[in-house]
């Protein structure tokens, strides 16, 4: 079961985050999914995840790539340490393109239920990346 759950999470990271495949997004997301990492007061359902990748990161980062460094699975949860990287070629949260390489470190936990994302918790270093880009 742990290997199957790790594959679900790996597939999401590559097909959805990196490649922007909306069909895979819908195939891998439970309809009652909860994103516990969503900012306070913001939507935390499935669309919160799609919005982050498709409407915030993808327009700002060309050649976006997800590198999985570690994955640990226990029961129905998979913890992943990854980096989302790309070239800052579009506006990112108000910061105009710099042409700089960007690497966002992320650690997240996903609860997988029946082969789909059921819940997500995560921490990332996006604020550090934004602060560095603002200095350019």
Image: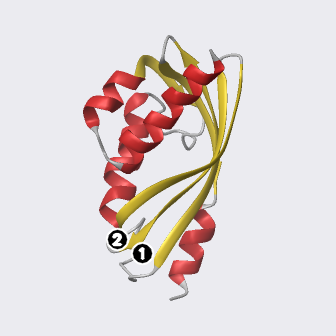
Instruction: Tell whether label 2 touches label 1 (CB within 8 Å).
Output: yes
Q: Residues within 10 Å of mark 1 (few under 14, many from 20)?
A: some
Give the number of callouts. Answer: 2
Q: Position of residue 34 (x, y in %)?
A: 52, 25
Disc 1 target residue: 95
Q: Is residue 79 above or below residue 91?
A: above
Q: Residue at 57% across / 70% down in the picture? A: 129
Q: What is the crowding at mark 2: few (fewer than 14 residues within 10 Å), some, or many (at least 20)? A: some
Q: Residue at x 37, y 40 (%)?
A: 15
Please tell me whether residue 53 is drawn above or below residue 93 in the rendered image. above
Residue 56 in picture, x, y percent from top left: 37, 56
Pick the residue in front: 41 or 73. Answer: 73
Quick check: 118 left or right of 49? right
Furthest-top residue in view?
A: 114
Identify the element where label 2 is drawn: loop
In the current view of this chain or complex, which residue is farthest to the bottom? Answer: 136
The part of the image, by quadrant, that contains residue 49 is top left
User: Residue at position x 65%, y 29% from top?
Assistant: 78
Q: Which residue is mark 2?
A: 91
Residue in the foreground of this view, choosing between 132 and 117? 117
Question: In the rendering, at what x and y percent does residue 87 appear?
Answer: 40, 73
């Amino acid at each position: 079961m742990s290997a199957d759950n790790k594959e679900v999470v790996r597939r999401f990271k590559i097909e959805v985050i990196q490649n922007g495949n909306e069909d895979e997004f819908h195939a891998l997301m439970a309809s009652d999914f909860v994103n516990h990492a969503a900012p306070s007061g913001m939507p935390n359902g499935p669309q919160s995840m799609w919005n982050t990748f498709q409407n915030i990161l993808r327009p700002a980062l060309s050649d976006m790539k997800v590198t999985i460094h570690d994955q640990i699975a226990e029961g129905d949860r998979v913890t992943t340490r990854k980096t989302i990287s790309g070239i800052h070629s579009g506006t990112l949260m108000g910061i105009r393109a710099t042409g700089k390489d960007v690497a966002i470190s992320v650690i997240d936990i996903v609860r997988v239920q029946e082969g789909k994302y059921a819940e997500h918790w995560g921490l990332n270093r996006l604020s550090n990346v934004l602060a560095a880009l603002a200095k350019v």
